[in-house]
Image: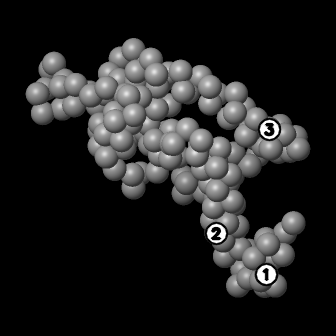
Amino acid sequence: MSLETDIKQEKFSSEYSKLVINIAYTNAYLGTIFAGTLKPYDLSMQQFNVLRILRGQHPKPVSINNITDRMIDKMSNASRLVEKLRKKSLVERKKCEFDGRQVDVCITTKGLDVLAELDGIMNDYDKQFHHLPEDEAKAANDILDKLRNK
């Protein structure tokens, strides 16, 4: 369906205005599906993002600042997210041996196991885009990269 049909709006002030609304609408649409996928695991999209960052650095610890820098949602409070994940035994926090003011975070075996289980589910999530030829997916990625890098 077209954006016009989905949001019941016949006309936009410009193609650029439509583009902004289309990106926001698509983000909300995909976010709803993604959140539903994570719900049985009691994880938010931001918590999932933190776990993936930590898995990518495993077994090295990662500082809260490094996590924040790498997060998709820059408005997230990484310290709060890490604490929630710690309470679920998915991550561990410890004082940095080089800088006592810094906290290092590592993913636990339980956290790795949860991500391993989610890997297959996320592969299925990605398959919803396989109706696009790979060259069109690449073109869409290139356009989105251009939008962020004015």
Residue drawn 70% across the image and 27% down it:
120
What residue is shown with label 3? 127
Note whether 30 is above or below 84 in the view shown.
below
- Residue 17 in picture, x, y percent from top left: 66, 76
Is 68 placed left or right of 16 in the picture? left
- Marks 2 and 1 sit apart, C-alpha to C-alpha, by 16 Å
- Residue 91 in picture, x, y percent from top left: 37, 28
Is label 1 in a helix, a strand or a loop?
A: loop
Is label 3 in a helix, a strand or a loop?
A: helix
Residue drawn 79% across the image and 72% down it:
6
Label 2 sits on what residue type?
Val
- Which numbered marker is on residue 83? none
Q: Is residue 41 in view from this perspective?
A: yes
- Residue 135 in picture, x, y percent from top left: 83, 39
Q: Nearer the viewer, residue 139 or 51?
A: 51
Are dots 3 and 2 in contact, CB under 8 Å? no
Q: Quadrant of the N terminus?
A: bottom right
- Which numbered marker is on residue 20? 2
